[in-house]
Image (cartoon, grey):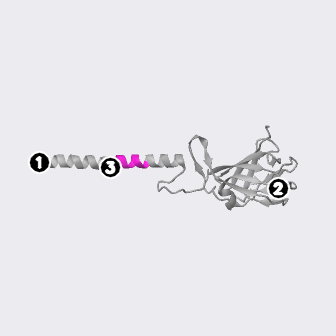
């Protein structure tokens, strides 16, 4: 009788331990995966990787077009963290760059998904401005009145997120040359 009781207690302890430690293991794997931008399978799930201390690894979408207007490709910028416009050796006329439409924008698929890009206007002449305009279903905000205009030779940021209405809102913030 005592032997059966001991076996039953051991079986109960093993069963409870499996339930408790399984949940703990999954939590640890999820927290580590979230911290390093990896999945539990060890496969990278996106080109964007977030590491500790604010380090973000991503790609560059670059265009050297001198056209007066163009639309950013949804797929091209989805895999980038920098949008590079122009070159430092060629100047272009004033350019208008339109964001993708909210219905085609990739990478901001779920409500609350957020991403920030650096817009690097490489055109050397400050008069070669790049104006960021909103595609269909996109709302642009700025820190100041003319933040949607990125002067040549400086950079800016574009931070966008998916709204509950399925539209996208972005904040454009032009930076200044600090030396």
Q: Is residue 23 magenta?
A: yes
* Side of 26 where 131 appears, left or right: right
- Magenta part of the chain: 20-26
| Image mark for residue 18 | 3
Q: Is residue 99 magenta?
A: no
**Considering the numbered disc 3 on the image, is that residue within a helix, a strand or a loop?**
helix
* Crowd tier of the residue under label 1, counting other residues whose Cα lies within 10 Å: few below 14, some 14–19, many 20 or above: few
Mark 2 vs mark 1, foreground winner is: 2
First along the sequence among labels 3 and 2 = 3
Taking depth in this image into account, of 158 and 58 the one nearest to the observer is 58
* Residue appearing at x 25%, y 48% in the figure: 12
Taking depth in this image into account, of 10 and 70 the one nearest to the observer is 70
Q: Give the Cα separation between the discs numbered 1 and 3.
A: 26 Å
* Residue appearing at x 79%, y 50% in the figure: 122
| Image mark for residue 1 | 1
First along the sequence among labels 1 and 3 = 1
Write down the residue under mark 2.
96
* Side of 29 where 98 appears, left or right: right
The residue sitting at the left extreme is: 1
| Image mark for residue 94 | none
Q: Give the Cα separation between the discs numbered 2 and 1.
A: 85 Å
First along the sequence among labels 2 and 1 = 1
Q: Is residue 168 visible?
A: yes
* Residue appearing at x 69%, y 60% in the figure: 76
Q: What is the x, y in percent for residue 160? A: 68, 50
Q: What is the x, y in percent for residue 14? A: 27, 48
* Residue appearing at x 36%, y 47% in the figure: 21
* Crowd tier of the residue under label 3, counting other residues whose Cα lies within 10 Å: few below 14, some 14–19, many 20 or above: few
């Amino acid at each position: 009788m005592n032997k059966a009781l001991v076996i039953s207690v051991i079986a109960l302890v093993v069963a409870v331990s499996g339930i408790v430690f399984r949940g703990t293991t999954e939590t640890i794997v999820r927290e580590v995966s979230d911290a390093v931008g990896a999945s539990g399978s060890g496969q990278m799930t996106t080109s964007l990787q977030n590491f500790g201390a604010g380090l973000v690894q991503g790609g560059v979408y670059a265009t050297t077009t001198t056209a007066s207007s163009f639309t950013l490709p949804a797929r091209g910028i989805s895999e980038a963290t920098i949008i590079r416009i122009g070159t430092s050796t060629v100047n272009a006329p004033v350019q208008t760059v339109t964001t993708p439409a909210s219905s085609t924008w990739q990478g901001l698929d779920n409500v609350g998904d957020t991403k920030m890009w650096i817009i690097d206007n490489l055109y050397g002449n400050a008069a070669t401005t790049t104006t960021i305009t909103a595609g269909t279903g996109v709302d642009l905000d700025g820190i100041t009145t003319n933040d949607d205009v990125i002067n040549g030779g400086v950079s800016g940021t574009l931070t966008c997120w998916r709204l509950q209405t399925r539209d996208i809102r972005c904040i454009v913030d032009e930076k200044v040359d600090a030396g």
